[in-house]
Structures are given as C-alpha cells and as structure tokens.
Amino acid sequence: MAAIDILADAAEKANQDPYSLPLDKINVANPFLFARDIHGPWFKRLRDEAPVHYCAESFFGPYWSITRYEEIIKVDTSHDIFSSEPAITIGDTQESFHLPMFIAMDRPKHDEQRKVVSPVTGAENLRHFEPIIRERTIDVLEQLPLGETFDWVESVSIELTTRMLATLFDFPFEERRKLTRWSDVATAIPGMHIIDTEEQRQQELLGCLEYFTGLWNERVNRAPGNDLVSMLAHGEATRNMPPLEYLGNLVLLIVGGNDTTRSTMTASALALHQHPEQFEKLVANPQLIDSMVAETIRWQTPLAHMRRMCKVDTQLGGQHIKAGDKVVMWYVSGNRDERFMQNPDAFIIDRPDVRRHLSFGFGIHRCMGNRLAELQLRILWEEILQRFARIEVMGEPQRTVSTFVHGFTALPVQLHQL
Ligand code: HEM
C-alpha cells in the first residue's frame, strides 16, 4: 500500500469503537488515536482484558502491548530479557540508514556512552543553568501580547526548549531554529506536513551531521568544555564514533530534550485551563508548582511508549513471549492504570506520590534530563504566576500525529493581565 493509503486506512480505523472489536483485532499503534486524543478507551480495554496483548498484524509488524503499570516496570528493568537494540520506537529503523544511539544500546556500551554526556544534566550544571533559564523565560514571557490570541506552542514551548537545547550544545544561538527543525524531521511521519519522504529525512539529517561535524572539529582541539559536543568529542567512549553514530547520539539528545519538554509546557497550560479549580489551588499556593509539574508530566506522558526486543523466551502476565518478539511498553496507558492510582484520568496537582509516574521510564535508560525538564517547567510557572492572571485556551489544541511523541502542534491562547 502507498504511504498515503496507509495513513487514510489508519485514520478510518481510529473511528472504530474499541469495544466492538474482537480482542485480537485491537491495534493501538495508530497515530490517529493520539492525534484525536481518543486512545483512552482502547488502552482501558487492554488493561482490563488483555494487559499483555499480542497484535499479529499492524503497519509496524506483529508486536506485544504492555499496558499496566507493574508489568511496564518489570519489562523496563529486566535488561537481560528485554533489549533496547536495535531501536526504541515501534517502527523499525531503515537498514540503509541506521543511526546507533546510546538509548538504543545495551550494556556495556550504553553505560559507557551515557557516562560521557550525563554531567550535562548533573546537579552542578543545573545550578549554573538556573539563572540563565530564568532570564530567558522572563524575556520570552515579556514579549507575549496581552488580550490577543497567539500560539502557545510556537511562542513559548518551542522558543524556550530551543533556547535550552542551544545552550546544552553551545550551538550558535541565532541559528537555533535549525535544532527545532532537525528534532521535528527526526520524528515526523512522511506525508504528515513536516517531511514528504524518508529520503528527505535522510538528506536533512545528513545536513545536521555536516553542521555538527563543523562544531566537533572546532572543539576537539580545544580544552574540554561542558557542552554536549565537547563532551562527545573528548569522551573516551565517544571520541572515535563513526559519523552515523555521532548523528544518532545527536538526534537522541536533540529529540530527548526538545519534544518532551515542549509537550509538557503546552500540556501544563492546557490542563490548568481545563481544570480551573486546580489552577486556583496553584495560585493560592505556589508551593505546589513542583507537584503540578510532576502531575502534568504524568497526565500528558510526553513519550507514549518505548519498545524492546525480547532476547529469550519468557513469561509475562500469563503470556508466552518468544525471543525476537517486539514488546511495546505503553507509558501513556500505565500512567492511567487504575490499579496503581485512584482516579487516574483526573488532573490533581496535589496528588500523593505524584512523582511515581512512568513518564521518565525506569532502569538503566531512565531519562537523563528529568531534573532539567522539571527545572525548566518550575521556572516557567514561577514567572507566569508573577505576570498573568490566567492563560485562557481559545480553541482546540492541535496534536502531533504520532504513536511516539505525544504532543501538540498548536494551542491558541490569550493571556489575562494580573
Ligand atoms: C518531560 C520531559 C521528558 C520526558 C517525559 C522524557 C522521557 C524519557 C524517557 C521515557 C526515556 C527512556 C526511558 C526508558 O527507556 O526507561 C528518556 C531517556 C532519555 N532522555 Fe528524556 N525525557 C524528558 C526530558 C529530557 C531532557 C530535557 C533531556 C536532555 C538532555 C533528555 C534526555 C534523555 C536521554 C539522553 C535519554 C536516554 C537515556 C539512556 O538511554 O540512558 N530527556 N527520556
């Protein structure tokens, strides 16, 4: 089937009632379920009736869905049974353009490469970043119009996360929107507005490699700095990487730090608009900002899933999973598991155990940037509360067409003066 027909078929199938289908015909790997925000009942059915579920036929081939909280943690922490290689999204990488990156590697290489770059989000760097993030946040917020509709995604979420990324890479600041483009290109489905074909993706990402090779060459002969390019160029486990592995790790660090935090910034504005009583609680007690941020990260779940490959025959939830099977951990479902928290569909900013969510994963691949993302969100809301009485959402959010990036492409809002 041509790509356009596959998308049309998926768009049509997303309209089905999940409870009208036989269990073995359920396929949750449909980007339109997420783009239309109608995935909830599909996952609820799987959690209740088939928490370890086999889908024999899909655009991505056969795969298992893991949808309950407890079993997701089991898979995410059983590194000897479930491998992160060769890829961590449900879609397979193209053999002719495989980009190795440490999120999609097992031990020991994963640990060695992660160690090279992890200081970028360490406690010392975060202390150093805090005033920079605050200054930029204020700068962006002060330029927003009052009482006029504008796009929160474009003007706030993308702008702030792109500025942060440029800082992490020590990337030429005036060219920072290149990073936004490469992030979008890396995760887009061909034919859905951003890119038309896989070939276009490859061309643009090779452009990214060329640009970053220039930065590498500049920094490799200088004293080691604490930006990501310098860390990779000097790190023992990364300094001899082949070019496509350099590109793979760049894509990981660009996408990892960008789409996810961007989606959380948008989700926080949306959730607090949709739940005015929670917003009032926040205004009355700004000490709740940290907890509100954690609740937003659970409620939104910016990455819907991570995938693994089963390495040895194993049992899970009474099912027999064979070596070579693809296993998808749906964080977006585990975070709404009624067995793990009460009233999981509600947005409650002062929930007990609010940080026990799955959105950052578990085990050796647990998100490397979680503290940085939370810091950016905390500062954003501290500064919003000092300036605006309310962020009013003026229309329907536009959501990303993807089974992986669970985010937004637009959110029209108006700001109200304090
Ligand atoms: C709300 C924001 C974020 C969310 C929801 C998020 C989510 C995730 C998830 C689910 C994983 C995989 C966990 C697993 O497989 O167990 C991950 C890994 C990763 N994240 Fe994040 N992330 C966020 C922000 C960031 C930021 C700001 C950075 C910036 C540096 C970042 C960098 C990474 C990296 C490098 C990995 C790979 C870690 C490894 O394989 O060892 N993330 N993230």
Image (cartoon, rainbow, N blue to C red):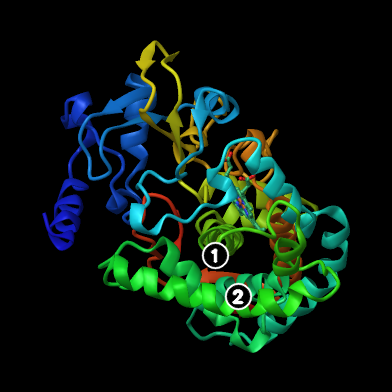
Number of labels in the image equals 2
Is residue 63 depicted above or below 124 in this figure?
A: above
Q: 10 Å neighbourhood of mark 1: few (<14), some, or many (≥20)?
A: some
The residues tagged by marks 2 and 1 sit, at their Cα atoms, a distance apart of: 8 Å
The response on whether ligand 1 sits within 8 Å of label 1 is no
The response on whether ligand 1 sits within 8 Å of label 2 is no
Q: Residue 10 appears at what percent x and percent y?
A: 19, 51
- The residue that appears at 67% across and 84% down in the rendered structure is 172
Q: Three-letter amino acid code at disc 1?
A: Pro
Residue 410, can we see it? no
Please, what secondary structure does the residue beneath circle 2 have?
helix
- The residue that appears at 37% across and 27% down in the rendered structure is 324
- Most extreme residue toward the top is 318
Task: Tell me which corner region of the image, top left, top right, bottom left or bottom right, holds residue 28.
Answer: top left
Q: Quadrant of the N terminus?
A: bottom left
- The residue that appears at 64% across and 33% down in the rendered structure is 363
Residue 56, can we see it? yes
Q: Residue 30 appears at what percent x and percent y?
A: 28, 47
**Residue tagged 2:** 213
Task: Tell me which corner region of the image, top left, top right, bottom left or bottom right, holds residue 197.
Answer: bottom left
Marks 2 & 1, CB-CB < 8 Å contact: yes
**Residue tagged 1:** 243
Is residue 316 depicted above or below 89 in this figure?
A: above
Please, what secondary structure does the residue beneath circle 1 have?
helix
Q: Relative to residue 178, is residue 377 drawn left or right? A: right
Is residue 6 depicted above or below 308 in this figure?
A: below
Q: Three-letter amino acid code at disc 2?
A: Thr
Q: 10 Å neighbourhood of mark 2: few (<14), some, or many (≥20)?
A: some
Residue 76 or residue 25, whichever sits in front: 76
Q: Residue 289 appears at what percent x and percent y?
A: 73, 55
